[in-house]
Amino acid sequence: MPRNKITAEHHTCFREENPEIRVGSSGLVRVVEKYEAGLGYKKISRALNISLSTIKSIIRKWKEYGTTANLPRGGRPPKLKSRTRRK
């Protein structure tokens, strides 16, 4: 019995479903506009060629914070101030 060859066509882990990794600011605005126009997550995803999980994240962020801009993150403050680092 011959063994089957493993090819990219057969395994989803090898496929590149969405070559666009990052969504620009204009893309974020288009997602929100389409959502406000009454389109669902799946339709927006197909129309803009952006993954469904990304669409959900963008809309969740827009609902919660009222913006699609990158928000500041928490974390430990730097040990060195910028002036000390320049020396």
Image (cartoon, rainbow, N blue to C red):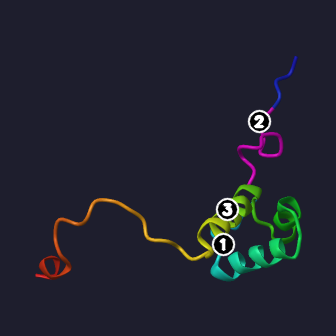
State left or right for residue 56 relative to residue 38: left
The answer to whether residue 9 is above or below residue 47 is above
Q: Secondary structure at mark 3?
A: helix
Q: Earlier in the sequence, mark 3 or mark 1?
A: 1
Q: Where residue 59 appears, x then y in whole percent?
A: 71, 66
Instruction: Name the side, left or right, on which 11 lies relative to 42.
Output: left
Horizontal and vertical percent for residue 10? 83, 40
Q: CA distance from mark 3 to mark 2?
A: 38 Å
Task: Look at the picture and state if 20 lies above or below 51.
Answer: below
Residue at image mark 2: 6
- Quarter of the image for residue 58 reads bottom right
Amino acid at dot 2 = Ile
Q: Looking at the figure, which quarter contains the C terminus?
A: bottom left
Nearest-to-viewer mark from 1 and 2: 1
Specify few, some or many for label 1: CA neighbours under 10 Å numbering under 14, 14-19, or 20 or more. Answer: few
At 82% across and 75% down in the image, what residue appears?
A: 36
Part of the protein shown in magenta: 5-17
Q: CA distance from mark 1 to mark 2?
A: 32 Å
Residue displayed at 67% across by 67% down = 63
Q: Secondary structure at mark 1?
A: loop
- In the displayed structure, does residue 65 sit left or right of residue 47? left
The answer to if 49 sits in the magenta stretch is no
Q: Which residue is mark 3?
A: 60
Q: Amino acid at mark 1?
A: Val
| Residue tagged 1 | 23
For residue 52, what is the image quadrant? bottom right
